[in-house]
Image (cartoon, rainbow, N blue to C red):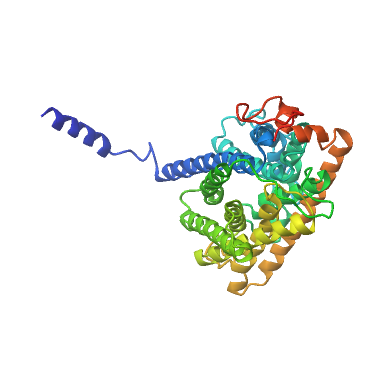
Amino acid sequence: MRYTIYYLITLAFFITPVRAADFSNNDFAQSINFTWLLVAAFLVFFMQVGFAMLGAGIIRVKNSLNFFTMIFMDFSLGALAFWAVGFALMFGGSNPSIGLDLGNTLVGYSGFLLSGQANDNYSAGFLLFQIMFAAAAVSIVACAVVERLKFRAYLMYTLAVTMIIYPIYGHWIWGGGWLSQIGVRDFAGSGAVHAVGGFVALAGAYLIGPRLGKYDKDGKPNVIPGHDITYIVIGTFILIFGWFGFNAGSTLAATDLRISVIALNTFMAAAAGATSACFLLMSKSGKADITMICNGALGGLVAITGPSAYVAPWAAVLIGLIGGIIFVKAYWFVEWKLRIDDPVGAIACHAANGIWGLLAVGIFADGTYQGVTGLIAGNTNQLYVQSIGAITAIVWAFGTGYILFSFIDHTIGLRVKPEQELQGLDISEHGISAYPEFTSNTRDGRQQ
């Protein structure tokens, strides 16, 4: 009898009508969308764990703590810089060049705690979501310059990327700027995040030069093995998981049921990228290198990020297959032909596939989302404008990255001293080792 009474009370609680004045259908939809936006932001934040593990696993043990610190500061210093300045430049109105229309000062909208908008709930959630994207763009650059960059130089470029370089291109394509006005589409950031981060990384890696011992006197690259393959695999799985928030979260609304197609496209492109990279490697060397396979999956993800909402799943598979091949070919080209040392493969993964993702919109968009059509639907103009967006990303990111890293080099300096590089940046830049109990030392005190 007692359990029956409990049951009836519970049932009455759940079936009690809710008055429309208390909670309308519109309120419910807004709550669902707001929750989805926050969950997506949390997922993208979790990608920082994937970046940290992937990069640290690929590099040597003596520099792993340095890389962890870089990634940690991406969303620390980088978040403050984007909050204070970058967000306003990115979303400050529909000015074709730069966002300056929000608030009475430069911080204006992004510094909403300072400008009287502390109770603007949606603004806070959207800002949080965008902060995570800015942190991802900076993390891409870290992967290309790790093991020889001064930590102070890293902090300086983190500020520049999150305050100026990323927000301005982001404004052009997402904030009502000139690229969006001519029709360029980049749903979740193949160009805005990945190509921009990748080409800034290219400039940095070119100017800082290769790691000691990377190339022989005849220019042949040597393999510098990473210290933990497990980190690489786990980090890649985490990145794939977080990418659901990155891509599907860019709808900004759970009531936009396209999120299911976007999520499927995201996963299938990752699977296809890993598969094509695996078979290409086996056809060349007979070996399936898990490090390259993981990066092939990431190449597929970068490629599908821009077109994820606009294409059918079959196209996502094809985009991912090509993305995996592009990563492997671009990695070999950067290392063997350009002789640029990119330890984690950020340039091949993010720069090359970021451009492919932009172009893929103009090829495979089928008109089923927001009316965006590409070549397969008979629209040649979309590929033309996507090409403009791609060329702009290359010129803007590499050009500003080159200026930035040149300035740093001529002021505080980019690179640590050779003896510090040999010792390892964990000790020389931070004074501690990530693995003090397991680090072996040679007779001259240099960590291996």
Q: Does residue 358 appear in the picture of this structure? A: no
* Residue positioned most to the right: 410
Residue 224: x and y in percent read 70, 46
- Give the side of residue 353 with respect to residue 212, left or right: left
Which one is nearer the viewer's eye here, 347 or 168? Answer: 347
- Give the side of residue 65 with respect to residue 165, left or right: left
Residue 154: x and y in percent read 75, 36
Which one is nearer the viewer's eye here, 428 or 98? Answer: 428
Q: Does residue 342 appear in the picture of this structure? A: yes
Q: Quadrant of residue 427?
A: top right
Which one is nearer the viewer's eye here, 128 or 430? Answer: 430
Which one is nearer the viewer's eye here, 173 or 28? Answer: 173
Is residue 228 positioned above or below 348 on the image? above
The tally of labels here is 0
- The residue under the point 64% across, 56% down is 186
- The residue under the point 36% across, 41% down is 20
Q: Quadrant of residue 364?
A: bottom right
* Residue positioned most to the bottom: 378
* Residue positioned most to the left: 1
Residue 383: x and y in percent read 68, 67
* Residue positioned most to the front: 443
In the rendered image, which quarter contains the C terminus?
top right
In the rendered image, which quarter contains the N terminus?
top left
Residue 394: x and y in percent read 76, 55
